[in-house]
């Protein structure tokens, strides 16, 4: 893998799964209760997507060891604030807030009764900016709203920021809310109602052997078909141990001899959360002892685009890194 | 048609908007100094009162409101005018 992104922190706020390893075997799905996870203070006027994202963001930043007080869910980061970027991925994030405001304006034929304090929720970047405000993240801040590939596209942007030196750590959070507005717009009986966050940054095992990276990602690539995607990823299929399909299921069958991996749970239509969910599922498998390289693919024939990344087990990746360093040294 | 609120209803509405316990909304608790109200929350309070009481409050009027006592005075004036 030419470019490597190190997953140094993971946060999960999904119905029935509140941490990385629970993704492999979720409990009976109960809606995520953000107030129970990070306290109710500061959540009053945030929309559902922002609340879910703040939960996952807190867990990921804590997991990465970046918070000044890990037990305080309103803690700022302990590292240089301008070195931490935020990228949110969401397709339906504030759709409910926008629809409700339009209804208010339509009913009163004026903007007089529009809630002033709700207006920040009408910004497409509200999720990323609220995460930055709450946790004191002053690096680049943006939102990717790019359909089914949105989660993996956000990882591509994270790689770009790290490579360009614009950030040392990137918080990537993918979130979707489930509500009537989303179901109607997306034409789905049930949308995923949750968030997954990852912190990407320098290999922690270089600075802290007690906190090695949880997975190593290759540069994300895009192509019109899955067949076109593989050469762009530079992937040797004989070295891939499994792949996550774009439907979150195995309907695409084998790629070469590579077997599909089922996410094994119906989370609802995952939209932009799928890509990060695949990566976290892979990281959970690695934590449980699996090794090797997995392929995550998102996309939709209707969109005419697929996006993929390789997810490698950390210890093996460290060895590969060491070998590369050794070669360079020689 | 303007709608009057009794004291308990008014305190409940303010507590809800400010996300505070009703007990802390006393006559003279200062919205900014004691209750953490900022300009955005003050506007939100004005809109909430407009909706609930079916009255119009100009943004210039809410600037002078600093406590529950001021809210009551403002509403009394509005409701008298409306009546």
Image (cartoon, helix red, strand yellow):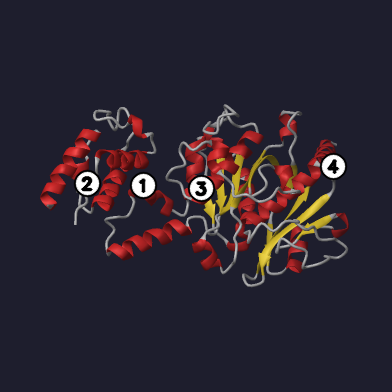
In this figure, which residue is indicated by the disc labeled 2?
B59
In this figure, which residue is indicated by the disc labeled 4?
A289
Task: Indicate the chain on which mark 2 is placed.
Answer: B
Q: Is residue A101 left or right of residue A71?
A: left
Disc 3/disc 4 C-alpha distance (Å) = 33 Å
Do discs 3 and 4 share a chain?
A: yes
Q: Are marks 1 and 2 in contact (CB under 8 Å)?
A: no
Do discs 3 and 1 share a chain?
A: yes
State the mark number for residue A238. Answer: none
In this figure, which residue is indicated by the disc labeled 1?
A117
Asked which secondary structure carries label 2, the reply is helix
Q: Residues within 10 Å of mark 4 (few under 14, many from 20)?
A: few
Q: Residues within 10 Å of mark 3 (few under 14, many from 20)?
A: many
Marked residue nearer the N-terminal end (4 or 1): 1
Q: Is residue A262 left or right of residue A171?
A: right
Task: Indicate the chain on which mark 1 is placed.
Answer: A
Asked which secondary structure carries label 3, the reply is helix
In this figure, which residue is indicated by the disc labeled 3?
A50
């Amino acid at each position: 893998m030419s470019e490597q992104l190190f997953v140094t922190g993971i946060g999960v706020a999904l119905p029935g799964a509140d941490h990385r390893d629970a993704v492999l075997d979720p409990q009976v799905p109960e809606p995520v209760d953000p107030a129970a996870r990070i306290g109710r203070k500061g959540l009053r006027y945030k929309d559902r997507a922002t609340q879910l994202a703040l939960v996952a963001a807190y867990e990921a930043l804590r997991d990465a060891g970046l918070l000044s007080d890990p037990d305080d869910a309103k803690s700022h980061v302990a590292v240089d604030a301008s070195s931490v970027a935020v990228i949110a991925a969401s397709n339906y994030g504030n759709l409910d807030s926008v629809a409700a405001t339009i209804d208010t304006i339509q009913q009163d034929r004026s903007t007089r009764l529009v809630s002033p304090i709700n207006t920040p929720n009408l910004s497409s970047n509200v999720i990323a900016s609220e995460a930055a405000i709450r946790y004191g993240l002053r690096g680049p801040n943006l939102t990717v709203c790019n359909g089914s590939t949105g989660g993996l596209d956000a990882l591509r942007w994270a790689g770009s920021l790290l490579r360009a030196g614009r950030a040392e750590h990137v918080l990537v959070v993918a979130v979707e809310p489930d509500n009537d507005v989303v179901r109607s717009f997306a034409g789905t009986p049930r949308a995923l109602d949750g968030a997954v966050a990852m912190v990407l940054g320098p290999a922690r095992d270089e600075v802290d052997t007690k906190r090695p990276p949880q997975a190593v990602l290759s540069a994300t690539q895009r192509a019109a078909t899955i067949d076109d995607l593989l050469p762009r990823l530079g992937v040797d299929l004989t070295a891939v141990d499994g792949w996550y399909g774009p439907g979150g299921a195995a309907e695409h069958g084998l790629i070469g001899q590579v077997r599909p991996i089922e996410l094994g749970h119906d989370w609802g239509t995952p939209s932009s959360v799928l890509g990060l969910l695949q990566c976290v599922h892979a990281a959970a498998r690695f934590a449980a002892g699996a090794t090797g390289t997995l392929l995550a693919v998102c996309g939709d024939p209707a969109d005419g685009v697929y996006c993929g990344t390789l997810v490698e087990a950390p210890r093996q990746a460290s060895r590969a890194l060491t070998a590369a360093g050794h070669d360079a040294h020689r | 048609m303007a709608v009057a609120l009794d004291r308990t209803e008014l305190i409940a509405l303010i507590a809800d908007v400010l996300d505070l316990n009703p007990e802390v909304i006393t006559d003279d608790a200062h919205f900014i100094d004691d209750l953490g109200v900022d300009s955005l929350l003050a506007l939100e309070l004005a809109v909430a009162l407009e909706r609930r009481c079916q009255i119009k409050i100009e943004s210039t009027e809410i600037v002078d409101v600093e406590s529950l006592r001021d809210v009551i005075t403002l509403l009394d004036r509005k409701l008298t005018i409306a009546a």
